[in-house]
Amino acid sequence: MRGLLITFEGIEGSGKSTQAHRLSLGLSACEAGTVLTREPGGSAVAEQIRQLVLTRGSEPVDPRAELLLFLAARSQHVQNKIRPALESGKIVICDRFTDATLAYQGGGRTISDEFLRTLNDWATGGIKPDRTYLIDMPVEIGLARARGRSAGSSPDRFESEGTAFHEAVRRRYLELARLEPERILVLRGTDSEETLAHQIKDDVNRFLSGRISNAQR
């Protein structure tokens, strides 16, 4: 049976990386095996692109160039890590995936949604998440967390964006959740870390049980 792709999404400082890590630990005994990964990144070449696209430099990055860099990293990531893991039946837990492009480059950079979906499908070869956890929280809280986390070092290019940009990203994420409620589960990022972890683990267990039952029919 094909593996399962679980993705985590949210604005800066939402806590999605923490929850992805916790879920990976919680599923470590799963017979199928799990893979924890992230975007941009997840493979050697994609991690190099991550540094390029997130590091602030003296030259502004054109939104089209930014988009193409993210897509290049995703294509490399999918081909070298995600697809092989899914084909071997593993559970892949990914910190950001295609929804991030729709939210950041679509909502934040105002690039056409239809165009972005076409490019996402091209870069992934049609691979889509089976379950997505959107950890939603007010922008001011998320940015405060993110900037506090990077205290002593320079914030990355996205952490440096203004509030209006992040509000647009958040709105787009919530719109995506309204369009696909059967896939995207919205969680309150202001809940405690423990509460979120329990909600996610319970939902994953229900999701896995339903999937097994359907496969046995």
Image (cartoon, rainbow, N blue to C red):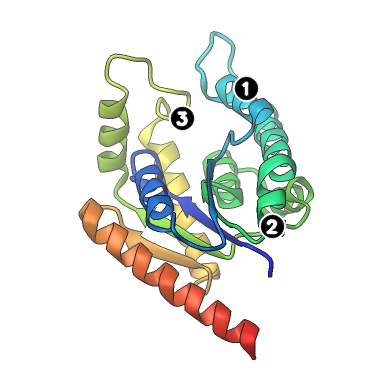
First reached walking from the N terminus: tag 3 or tag 1: 1
**Residue 113 numbered mark, or none:** none
Q: Which residue is mark 1?
A: 48
| Residue 27: percent from left, percent from top | 43, 58
**Pair 2/1: label in front:** 2
Q: Residue at x 39, y 51 (%)?
A: 25
Residue 191 in view: no
**Residue type, label 2:** Ser
Q: Residue flagged by tag 1: what amino acid is it? A: Gln
Dot 2: within a 10 Å radius of its alpha carbon, few (fewer than 14), some, or many (20 or more) residues?
few
Residue at 53 percent of width and 69 percent of height = 183
**Helix, strand or loop for disc 2:** loop
Res. 166 in view: yes
Please give the residue where the numbered disc 3 appears in the rendered image.
158
Q: Quadrant of residue 33?
A: bottom right
Q: Is residue 189 above or below residue 215?
A: above
> Residue 52 appears in which quarter of the rendering?
top right
Q: Which mark is residue 88?
A: 2
- Closer to us: mark 3 or mark 2? 2
Image point 32% across, 23% down: which residue?
150
Residue 166 x/y as whole percent: 41, 40
Q: Residue furthest bottom?
A: 217
Give SS at disc 1.
Answer: helix
Under mark 3, the amino acid is Phe
Q: CA distance from mark 2 to mark 1?
A: 26 Å
Residue at image point 35% right, 44% down: 18
Q: Position of residue 138 (x, y in %)?
A: 29, 48
Q: Residue furthest top?
A: 58
**Contact, mark 3 vs mark 2 (Cβ under 8 Å):** no
